[in-house]
Amino acid sequence: MFAAFLLKLFCITHSTRRYQKQGIIKETFFVKIGEGIVVSIKDIAKQAGVSISTVSYALNGSPKVTEETSARILAIAKELNYIPNAAARSLKKRETKIIGVFLTDYSGAFYGQLLQGLQEALTSRGYELIVCSGKESHRFLPERMIDGAIILDVTFSSDELIKYADLGHKLVVLDRELDHPNINQILLDNKAGATLAIDHFIDKGHRKIYAVTGPNISYDSQQRLQAVRQTVERYQDIEYEEIEGDFNKPAGVRAAQQIIAEYSKPVAVFCLNDEMAIGMYNYLSKTDYRVGEHVHIIGFDNIEVSHYTDPRLTTIDYSKRKWGTLAAEHLLKLIANEPLENERIYVSLIDGGSVGTM
Amino acid sequence: MFAAFLLKLFCITHSTRRYQKQGIIKETFFVKIGEGIVVSIKDIAKQAGVSISTVSYALNGSPKVTEETSARILAIAKELNYIPNAAARSLKKRETKIIGVFLTDYSGAFYGQLLQGLQEALTSRGYELIVCSGKESHRFLPERMIDGAIILDVTFSSDELIKYADLGHKLVVLDRELDHPNINQILLDNKAGATLAIDHFIDKGHRKIYAVTGPNISYDSQQRLQAVRQTVERYQDIEYEEIEGDFNKPAGVRAAQQIIAEYSKPVAVFCLNDEMAIGMYNYLSKTDYRVGEHVHIIGFDNIEVSHYTDPRLTTIDYSKRKWGTLAAEHLLKLIANEPLENERIYVSLIDGGSVGTM
DNA sequence: TAACTCTATCGAAACGTTTCAATGAAAGTG
DNA sequence: CACTTTCATTGAAACGTTTCGATAGAGTTA
C-alpha cells in the first residue's frame, strides 16, 4: 500500500522476484524509474501466497477456486493494479476477441452508421472492433491479431481472401460474392435498387437515360449496371447510354460535362452512387442547367450530403446500421461454427425531388 | 512441395514433430482437416536443418547468419507459407508496431481526412493504425496491444489518461491540454478561430450576436467560447447571448427555434461547430427566415456537408490531414524518446456567404 | 481404521517468438 | 605448433498466460 503510494508520487518502485530452479535460488531485485512497473499474475501469486495457476483460475472466475481465496486474489489484483497481458493471453488461447473491419479508405460517407451497427453488435457479445485500412494492415488477419474480419475493401483481392479462408480464418464480405465454408456474405440488393431507379425514371416519363458507372472491379457497380441494362431492355424506345465512372466525385463532374456537351433535350442520369451524383450537382450548379428540370438525377446510397443539395437528391436507400449489425452477427456465428445463410439488405427509393416529370 | 499441393487440393495436411526431453523421445503425428496448419519458426528450422534461433535471425535479416543459409531459410519460409505470430512476437519484444486512435464515435464528419493523415505518416514509418471507439476498447491501451495512442475521445477521462501515461504509455491528445512527460498535445487554435468569426460579424456590421456552445466538458468548446467572450467585450454596444448546445445537429435545431421565437431584427449566430450550424439551416429552411439575410451564421470545422448548403456556410477551416500527420509524427517521437514541443494547428475563415452585410 | 472420494491447490508444460551466452570450427598470429 | 581471434551457429531462458494432470488433506463410507 505504501509502496503504491510512493509509486504514484515519485514514479519509482521496486519489486523482488525469486526464481527457484534446479535447486538453486536466484534472487532478483529491480527498480524501474519513470516507466511504471508491469504487474503480472506472478506478482499476485507471490503476494497472495498461492500458485500462479490458482491466480489465473481466480481471475477467470473459475469455480475450482474457493470463494474466499478468489476474493483475496481479486483484491490483491486490484490493489496491485494488475492488467492482463493481451499478447500472452492470445498466444496461449489462440484468440483475441477482436474483430477487424477492413475499409478501402476512411472517407466513405456511410461508414459511420455501418461501423456503429457493427460496434454495438460486437461489444454486446464480448468482442471488440478495430477499423483498418490500407494494404499494410492486411497482415492483421493472418498474424492472428483478430479473430475474424469484415471486408469492405476492394484492395483485398478475392484470391487473397480465399487463401485466408483456407487457412481457417472467418470472414464476412460486404463487397463481393465468394463461395467458401469460412466466408459469409451480406450483400445489398443492388439489382432491386437499380431497377427501382430506372422504373422511377420511366414512371416520370423519361426516355433518354444515362448511367454513370462505378469502377468495373466493383461488385456493386457490376450488379447495379447489370440490372440497369436488363430494365432498360424491358422498355421500348429508350435512348440509353453509359458513362464510365469510379464512384468518386470528379467522375460525376466529368460525366456532367459530357452530358452537357451533348445536350439536346432533358435527360435522366442514374449515378451508380451518391458521391458521383454530388459531383454532378457541383458542376451543374456552375451552369444554367438545373437539376430536376434539364438534368434529372438519381443516386445510390443515400449519404448525408445528398440531403443538403437543392433539390434534395432522389436516391436508393438502405439501412447501413442494419448492414453492420447483420454482418457482426453472421461473423460471430461463423466463428462459433453455427450454420447460417447468406443474407441480403433490402433497398428502397427515396424521392428527393431531383427527378421531375417529363 | 507435393504435400503443399495436397494441402491446397484437399485441405488436409500432416506434420511431424519430435520433442527430445529428459532423454526420452516423444513423437507426435497429427493431421488437421479443414482448418489449415500453422507453420512456425520451428517447422522452418526442422525443414532447413538449423536451429530456431538461426531461423529467427535470418527472418529478421540479422547479419549474424550467412548470406547462403539465410537465403535457404527464407526460401523455405516462403515455401511453407510461414506467417509470424504477432502475439508471440509482441509478448517477447514488448511492442506491437500498432498505434491506436480513439474516437468518441465513428460518425465525426472530419475524421476521414484526419485518419488519412495519420495513416500515411504511420505506415511510412513501419507502424500500423487501428481505429477504436467505445469505452470497452480503452483496454487496448493498458493491455499493450498498441504502442501508443492518439486521443480524440471525450469518453476518456483525463485522470484515466494520466494514469496510463504514468504507467509508461505514450499519448498524443487532440482534445484537451495535459501536462505530462509521456503526453504530447496538438491542439487547434480554437481561440484564433473564434476571434476570426466574431470579427467577421463585426466587420459585416452585426451588433446582435448569439453563440451556440458545445458541451461544456469539451475543451474545444471551452476555448472557443472563452475567445468569443473576450472578443465581444472588446467592442461596444454588442448584444451578446449564449445558447447551450452539444455539437450535434438537434442542438442547432433547438437553437434556431429559440432564436426565431425571440426574433426582432437580423441576428448573427456563431455555432461553435458546423454540425449545429447544419441543424440550424435545416430548421430555418422550413421557415420564412433566410440564412444570410435574417439569420447570419458562422460555423467551425468546415465539414463537407457545409459546402452543400445554400448559401454555403461561412466557417472556420483548418487542415485535418495536417493535424493527423503532425499527431502521428509527435507520437512516434514520443515513443522514440525524442524531445519535442506541443504544437498548434492554425485556422482560417472561409467565407461561404452565410453572413450578409448589415 | 483402512479404503475410498472429493476438491482446492499446485507444478509444469505449452503457446511462438527473441536474444543472450556458449560452442566449436576455421582462420589468423607469433 | 600452440595460441588467440573470429564468427556462424546453437541451446536455452524468457516474455505472461492457460490448462492438464498430479497431489494432498479433509470428509465419507464400510
Image (cartoon, coloured by chain):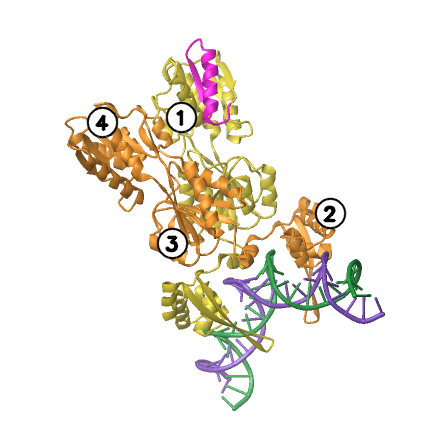
Chain colours: A yellow, B orange, C green, D purple
Work out how far the residue at label 3 is from the one at label 2, CA to CA, in angstroms. Answer: 56 Å
- Magenta residues, as a range? A245-273
- The disc at residue B295 is 4
**Residue B218 location in percent, x, y?**
30, 45
Q: Nearer the viewer, mark 1 or mark 3?
A: 3
**Residue drawn at the location 34% of the way across and 55% of the way down:** B159
Q: Nearer the viewer, mark 1 or mark 4?
A: 4
Work out how far the residue at label 4 is from the one at label 3, CA to CA, in angstroms. Answer: 44 Å
Q: Nearer the viewer, mark 4 or mark 2?
A: 4
- Kindly check if marks 1 and 4 are in contact, taking CB atoms under 8 A apart as contact: no
**Residue A349 location in percent, x, y?**
39, 26
Q: According to the image, label 1 marks what residue? A: A315
Residue B323 visible (yes or no): yes
Q: Residues within 10 Å of mark 1 (few under 14, many from 20)?
A: many
Q: According to the image, label 3 marks what residue? A: B180
Chain-order first, disc 4 or disc 3: 3
Amino acid marked by disc 3: His
- SS assignment at label 4: strand
Work out how far the residue at label 4 is from the one at label 2, CA to CA, in angstroms. Answer: 75 Å
